[in-house]
Amino acid sequence: MQADLNFPFPQGPATGELVPVCPGVQWLRMPLPFSLNHINLWVLDDGDGCAIVDTGIHDDTTRGAWQSILDQHLGGRPVTRVLATHCHPDHIGAAGWLCEHWQAPFWITQGEWMQANLGQARNGGVSQEAMAAHFKRLGLPSSRIRRMTRMQGYFQRMVGPLPTAYERLVGADTLTIGGREWQVLIGRGHSPEHACFYCEELNLLIGGDQVLPNITPTIGVTAEEPNGNPLGLFLHSLDAFYALPPDCLVLPAHELPYRQLHFRVTQLKLHHEERCDLLLRACGEPMVATEAAQAMFSHRNLSGFDIMLALGETLAHLHLLMRQGAVERFTDPDGVYRYRTT
Ligand SMILES: [Zn+2]
């Protein structure tokens, strides 16, 4: 295994600019209103038109940038289809708008399609009651829980009306786009059924959020599935990526394209192993989830939305350890969970 990743492109495209990656594949970026301030999107030649992979959020900036890219750089060629890696707002926010404008079909896995529809129908997919009960069990004070339930609705703010129907992407299926074959690989844990696309002819993987080069994708337990094991699913689904050539070029949804996929997959696995070890040491003394989160994110002052993400991540590691028999959970008389190393 060769050490460390290499990055053939020193920097990403500016908003509204297209950068060729290889024949028939172009790279663009859309801005995001988060600390992670951009998303990478991909345009693939598809006969007389082009296929788009992921869309950016649904706001004026993104729609304006798409308009100028389609008019100026793609010479008014039609969008033949919109493909989504997964249902998060930065990936599918503008999908409905693009599909409607071009009368183009929307390709997504069934799991992501369902989750996107839940997100739009139900404040991100979960009721306020379920959310309040979940965070109470984790030891969060009720004043904080009230503030948290008020933060709901972010999905609708960044996602426009969804496409009216979808074409199903299925793991291991092969799609032909512009005469080239792309194999669908499924990642889990970050989202329900995350599609990645591998083209053997180009030795290229569109990786979405599954295999990012520096940051690790959020793997979190949510109120919707409070006893879920997303980290177990994520780590298991990563194994499939060892079957791809180690020197393939990975096009991630954030940061820069890179090579050394196998090395990165191993790094991701080790990262989570280290996080589990940290929790195992911390839970020598029984603790509630908020304390465990503080131990895991001790370098950060957690507030607002970060608390929710940190708790989700912490639970993901605790639940994996519980399934391995390394941690047990018991319930206080007041209904709050405590976790301890066995
Ligand atoms: Zn995502």
Image: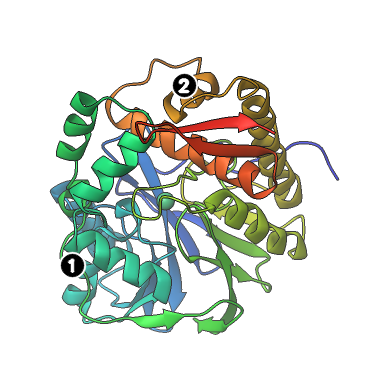
Residue 171 located left or right of residue 115? right
Asked where in the image residue 108 lies, by quadrant, the reply is bottom left
Q: Secondary structure at mark 1?
A: helix
Q: Label 1: which residue?
A: 97
Q: Is the CB–ligand 1 distance for label 2 below 8 Å?
A: no
Q: Is residue 109 visible?
A: no
**In this orientation, which residue lies closer to the viewer: 160 or 7?**
160
Q: In the displayed structure, does residue 201 sit left or right of residue 197?
A: right
Is 291 or 152 nearer to us in this picture? Answer: 291
Q: Quadrant of the C terminus?
A: top right
Q: Are marks 2 and 1 in contact (CB under 8 Å)?
A: no
Q: Residue at x 30, y 75 (%)?
A: 77
Task: Identify whether 50 is placed above or below 228.
Answer: below
Q: Amino acid at mark 1?
A: Trp
Which residue is pictured at 41% across the width and 44% down the height? 13
Residue 11 in the image: above or below residue 221 = above
Q: Which residue is mark 2?
A: 291
Q: Position of residue 234 (x, y in %)?
A: 59, 54
Q: CA distance from mark 2 to mark 1?
A: 43 Å
Q: Residue at x 32, y 51 (%)?
A: 90
Q: Residue at x 38, y 74 (%)?
A: 50
Image x and y of residue 195, in percent: 50, 67
Classify mark 2: helix, strand or loop.
helix
299 relative to 132 in the view: left or right: right
- The amino acid pointed to by label 2 is Glu
User: Which residue is most to the front?
Assistant: 333
Residue 244 appears in which quarter of the rendering? bottom right
Q: Visible in this render: residue 213?
A: yes
In the rendered structure, the answer to whether residue 326 lies left or right of residue 123 reads right
